[in-house]
Image (cartoon, rainbow, N blue to C red):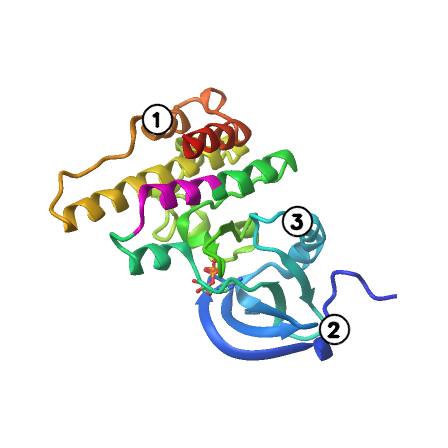
Amino acid sequence: AKDQWEVDPEELILGQEIGSGQFGLVLEGSWRDLKVAVKMVREECMSDDEFKEEARIMMRLSHSKLVQLYGVCTQHSPICLVFEYMENGCLTDYLRERKGSLSQDILLGMCLDVSEGMAYLEMSNFIHRDLAARNCLVSKNNEVKVSDFGMTRFVLDDQYTSSQCSKFPVKWSAPEVIRYCKFSTKSDVWSFGEFGRLSAIQLFVNAGLRLLKPRLAPDSVHLLMEWCWKEKPDDRPTFGLLFHELASLSDA
Ligand code: ADP
């Protein structure tokens, strides 16, 4: 019997290249009438066997604010990871392209989407470990979804995984991660605080371009960011609470 998480290579049609990342090329493709993104994993970039175990767990994680992993294709080399296709690409590029044109409501909605996806991971006791705008993708209808959860554990490039090294994402990392590599849902919460900063910068650029008085992040968002950046992990809020707070702000 075939493993449920194994994608039959016969059913997978590969299209053109859409990007490249930590593990290698990303192609667009189709699988059983679904448009998909396929990550082709270069062998020297990933600890394969450990990943295959973990893929089963990752496939069970399913939520509208997470980029779905549909399956893996491990029979040939390179192994392929088959994901939900996100038409509007990565959030970093999305924000860069729309610099200054996104309203406060849209930016708040983006934070709300991420907090909802993360609240689901929190409930599932799954630590993201690399939450950042570059690991969020934007759908056709401009929903933001969290991607690449847990994947840094399989990166073999120690320039990326060691906090002493050049590619380590210092800006988004909690102090206990930088000091002791102590990852937790609360270190994810720290990283989430950066989305608030990112939104504030967008609003600032927005206002600047229109020669208006720069509008900074609304006080309530600022308070939430500060809360995410408490030194002690236990003093930080949960994603459940952050989602709730952000939802009540966007209703207001
Ligand atoms: P990394 O392994 O470094 O995180 P990414 O996941 O960022 O690599 O993939 C690199 C690029 O490929 C992204 O910036 C994005 O443009 C594209 N991409 C990745 N996953 C998807 C997807 N599910 N749908 C559409 N484009 C994707």
State the residue at coordinates (80%, 62%): 3
Q: Nearer the viewer, mark 1 or mark 3?
A: 1
Quadrant of the drawing holding the C terminus: top left
State the residue at coordinates (65%, 56%): 51
State the residue at coordinates (74%, 61%): 5
N-terminal label among 3 and 2: 2
Crowding at mark 3 (Cα within 10 Å: few <14, some 14-19, many 20+): some
Label 3, secondary structure: give it. loop
| Residue with the most extreme front position | 252
Measuring from the top left, give residue 106's x and y in whole percent: 38, 46
Residue named by callout 2: 8
Residue named by callout 1: 220
Whether 137 is among the magenta residues is no
N-terminal label among 2 and 1: 2
Label 2, secondary structure: give it. loop
Position above or below: 97 against 118: below
The magenta span reads 102-112
Which of these two is toward me, 22 or 145?
A: 145
Magenta-colored segment: predominant secondary structure: helix
Q: Quadrant of residue 95?
A: bottom left
Query: Disc 2 versus disc 1: distance between alpha carbons?
Result: 49 Å
| Residue with the most extreme right position | 1
Residue 62: which numbered mark, if any? 3
Q: Amino acid at mark 3?
A: Ser
State the residue at coordinates (52%, 32%): 239
N-terminal label among 1 and 3: 3
Measuring from the top left, give residue 194's x and y in whole percent: 36, 39
Lateral position of residue 119 relative to residue 200, left or right: right
Quadrant of the drawing holding the N terminus: bottom right
